[in-house]
Image (cartoon, rainbow, N blue to C red):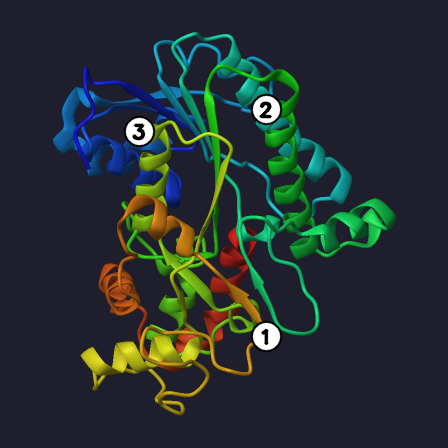
Amino acid sequence: MAQATAKELILVTGVTGYIAGRTAEAFLQAGYRVRGTVRDLSSARQTQKALSEFGSQFEVTVVPDICVAGALDEAMEGCSGVVQIAAPMRISGQKAIPAVEEAVNIVNNVLESASEHQSVESVVLMSSVSAIRRSGSGPYTFTEKDWNTEVEAIFRNDPDNMSGGMIYRAAKVAAERAFWKYRATNKPTFAMAAINPSFVHGPPLVVPNSVFKIKGTTGFIVSIQAGLDGPDVFKAYPWWVDVRDVARIIVFCVKSHADGERFLAVSAYGPQQAVADVLRSVRPNSRVEKGVPGEGYAMPGYRAPENEDQILDGSKLVRVTGQDYIPYEQSVVDTANAYEPLLANLGPSIYIKKMSQKIFSYLMPSSK
């Protein structure tokens, strides 16, 4: 990708997060300047260290509560692009109605602030496959044209009895609906695009100092790497994309001023057995459980097996950008290599298994 001209400034919200950190890095590598928002400066130290090679091209600014109207007004000064990734919502303990309202308010706050700054030319929203995919019977291929109308109906009819996962999905759908409603109603001068990734893995920009501090869906690979059984949610919907591909499409959207576009980012079908097969191929003597090699996915290319009715089609991203996804094997191995030092300090596998539930309690709130 060509370098940005005149060192344009991009705002990345929640820059210490897993996807946001890699996104900031991708913009810096493409020649942009980046301003990242954090809740407090102390939380940004590791991210600043990881991006220190870019010097003054990377800066952070404190936004204590992105839910407050006008919270981003100062942060957007001089920015040509805005990437909304920060989402302070946690599933645990949340009721559906306030969680969905919070998600919608955040999106509207971002867009209202962007509208107050003539310098802003592009806004990109980090949405989710949860806003697209719904359950159902019979063969179906999901693309960018689809919406999770199922969870929308549940939210309308019975919000008080929604599970944490349903609340997460409802919030994602509502937030993206609000994003596009704003565009249709207000017709802003800036371009607007949304990214809908499946489960995301790949090496983080900042590796935590403990396996119990891993957040997000990379924990699926770490659990298998440690000889554990992965969480059921990842077994049911094992569609994956590398975090570096997500960052790349965000940069593409800003640089090309993609407007009115959604991008379903999904590169491979990788159930637990696929992860195990990849890891055992490069580490035959590891503690990874052998399982039944080749079971549950199709080759070549880590595709869904014939008995999988619900298919996710991420081909638009490749078609529009002209660049293919990072190979699944590379993504799995790179992720495992990043976290391997943490596993070395955990001791016998029996100890790891006893602690696995604690690990997953950290992971699930961030699941896609």
| Distance Cα–Cα, label 2 vs label 3 | 19 Å
Q: Position of residue 362 (x, y in %)?
A: 50, 56
Of mark 3 and mark 1, the one earlier in the sequence is: 3
Q: Position of residue 117 (x, y in %)?
A: 45, 8
Q: Residues within 10 Å of mark 1 (few under 14, many from 20)?
A: some
The numbered mark at residue 309 is: 1
The numbered mark at residue 255 is: 3
Q: Position of residue 163 (x, y in %)?
A: 73, 57
Residue at which label 2 appears: 183
Query: Disc 2, disc 3: CB below 8 Å?
Result: no
Residue type at numbered disc 2: Arg
Where disc 1 sits, the SS reads: loop
173 up-or-down from 310: above or below: above
110 up-or-down from 314: above or below: above
Q: Residues within 10 Å of mark 2 (few under 14, many from 20)?
A: some
In this picture, residue 235 sits left or right of residue 75: right
Of mark 2 and mark 3, the one earlier in the sequence is: 2
Q: Nearer the viewer, residue 26 or 298?
A: 298
Residue type at numbered disc 3: Lys
Q: Residue at x 53, y 48 (%)?
A: 128
Residue type at numbered disc 1: Asp
